[in-house]
Image: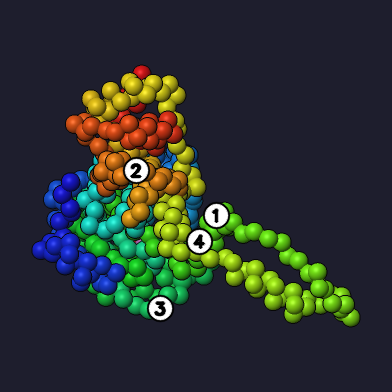
Amino acid sequence: MNNIALGDLTPKTFLRDFWQKKPLLVRNAIPHFQGLLTREALIELACDEEAHSRLVVQRRGEWQLKYGPLTMQDFSRLPKKKWTLLVQDINHFLPSARDLLLKFNFIPHARLDDLMVSYAPKGGGIGPHFDSYDVFLLQGSGSRRWQISDQQDDRYIADAPLRILENFCPEQEWVLESGDMLYLPPNYAHNGIAEEDCMTYSIGFRAPSHHELATQFLVYMQDHLEIDGWYADPDLHLQSQPALISSAMLRQARTILQKVKWDCADVEKFLGVYLTEPKIHVFFNPPEHPFPQQQFEQKIKENGLQLNLKSRMLYGNNSLFFLNGDVFEVDIGVHQHLIKLANEQKICTDETFSDETKKILYQWYLSGYVEVCGGFGEP
Ligand code: SIN
Ligand code: CO
């Protein structure tokens, strides 16, 4: 899969000079890109329970926001102009969306969040705002005006249902046509306004706050700690104030808490689990009538195997593979195939698998994490 074009930059120079540093406009990142789905298909997805969608409408200068799942009725009462539909996780539904994300393989999968697609008629947008993540805004059909600003003023309009900057001072602006792309680092103020009916593809990269990472690590450690012993005080002294937490008790508690230790291996496992954990609204459907193992093996030999579109897979340096929040420690003979599956999301037909590889792939097939390519999922 070819990387997306970055003008005259290589991925290396893009990372050195722009990534997390400054915006980059790329004309013709995908020449003649018209998008991956129609407005009607996007509306249909917005009505799906499993899709995370938002409808933003501007009426008489007032902002209105409705979260999905939406209904067809929500779309029948809209004004002609100045509204936007945004649908998250499009890569969970469209194989072509996964292929688009693979064009951004020069950024590690661990940083990838999702592909969001928006549709807006003329004048539609979600107002000037900051995002806390890196984003590539790729223009699908139609054109959109983007205004950006390096401003520090982050005061938002009070009482608006979404975060809209009160004092947005655009410093640069461009009209993006189909196939053009704008990269924005985190916390760079921006405002996108549809020039006409248009669809925008946002390839978003997540970065947890330090607080989130630390608290999630503590949650992980809670389930993985094993500490022996009981609090004991055989030499308890008589206390004149029975409600007082004594310094002896404090000392003992502190010593016990110092048994909470972690090393690099714990951090690696935590990261793999945390980064591949499915989002709250994501569920996997195991095949209803699965192939027996031998037939499954035959099928993947004929058609190849791929990750389910909703699956997230990463691996570490120590024979550890992470898939949808689970950890798998596997023998060296299995590595090569699983590494390929994680990096490319697919394994082709001409591979020969060891018994252990077949076993683990079959287990993942039964969980709905992987599937036979070409829709040959079940007999
Ligand atoms: C949009 O697609 O309308 C909004 C994307 C963004 O501003 O992050
Ligand atoms: Co934004």
Residue positioned 26% across, 43% down in the render: 336
User: What residue does disc 4 label?
Assistant: 217
According to the picture, the residue beneath numbered tag 2 turns out to be 331
The residue carrying mark 1 has its beta carbon less than 8 Å from ligand 1: no
Name which of mark 1 and mark 3 comes first in the sequence.
3
Of badges 3 and 2, nearer the viewer stands 2
Q: Amino acid at mark 3?
A: Asp
The amino acid at mark 1 is His
Disc 1 on helix, strand or loop?
helix
The answer to which of 82 and 139 lies nearer the viewer is: 139
- Residue 319: where, in percent of width, then height? 35, 49
Q: Residue at x 40, y 78 (%)?
A: 153
Mark earlier in primary sequence (4, 2): 4
Judge from the rendering whether residue 263 lies leftward or rightward of residue 357; answer left or right: right
Q: CA distance from mark 4 to mark 2?
A: 27 Å
Disc 1 designates what residue? 224
As shown in the figure, which amino acid type bears the numbered disc 2? Asp
Residue for point 71% across, 76% down:
250
Which element carries disc 2, helix, strand or loop? loop
Marks 1 and 2, how far apart at CA? 23 Å
Label whose residue precedes the other's in the sequence (1 or 2): 1
Of residues 61 and 358, the one nearer the viewer is 358
Q: Is residue 229 left or right of residue 350?
A: right
Residue tagged 3: 153
| Label 3 residue SS | loop
Closer to the eye: label 4 or 2? 2
